[in-house]
Amino acid sequence: MNSLRKNFFKDFYPHILCDYLYILSEKFNLFFHRCKIQYNILKNSRLLICELTRRTLKTGMNILGLKE
């Protein structure tokens, strides 16, 4: 995300960040439907992916001025 952040702040093109967040949410949605979290050996790893995705989406939305 460092290069994305550089381009966003350098040129101030919010659509770059919007595209990134949209693609991330699509990929997470696919992950969520394909990978069951409950009762799985990889439960903690998958929960971590969920948390990191949540943080990234929240940060991106805050940068764009969209609050909870």
Image (tube, rainbow, N blue to C red):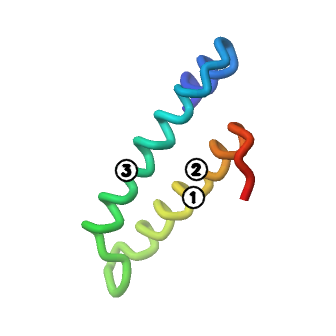
Q: Disc 1 or 3, which lies upstream in sequence?
A: 3
Relative to 23, say whether 15 is above or below: above
Amino acid carrying mark 1 in the image? Arg
Relative to 48, say whether 25 is above or below: above
Apparent side of residue 62 relative to residue 26 in the rendered image (left or right): right
Amino acid carrying mark 2 in the image? Leu
Extreme residue toward the left, this view: 34
Which quadrant does the N terminus fall into? top right
Which residue lies under the disc numbered 3?
26
Identify the residue shown where x is 34% and y is 87%: 39
Amino acid carrying mark 3 in the image? Glu
Which residue lies under the disc numbered 1?
54
Which residue lies under the disc numbered 2?
57
Determine crowd level at label 3: few under 14, some 14-19, many 20+ residues with C-alpha closer than 10 A.
few
Q: Secondary structure at mark 3?
A: helix
Identify the residue shown where x is 44% and y is 51%: 25
Residue 64: x and y, percent? 68, 37
Residue 17: x and y, percent? 56, 32
Determine crowd level at label 1: few under 14, some 14-19, many 20+ residues with C-alpha closer than 10 A.
some
Measure the C-alpha gap from mark 1 to mark 2.
Answer: 5 Å
Q: Which mark is residue 31?
A: none
Q: Secondary structure at mark 2?
A: helix
Depth order, front residue of 51/18: 18
Identify the residue shown where x is 47% and y is 70%: 47
State which quadrant residue 65 falls in: top right
Relative to 27, say whether 19 is above or below: above
Judge depth for marks 1 and 3 and give the one in front. 3
Residue 8: x and y, percent? 62, 22
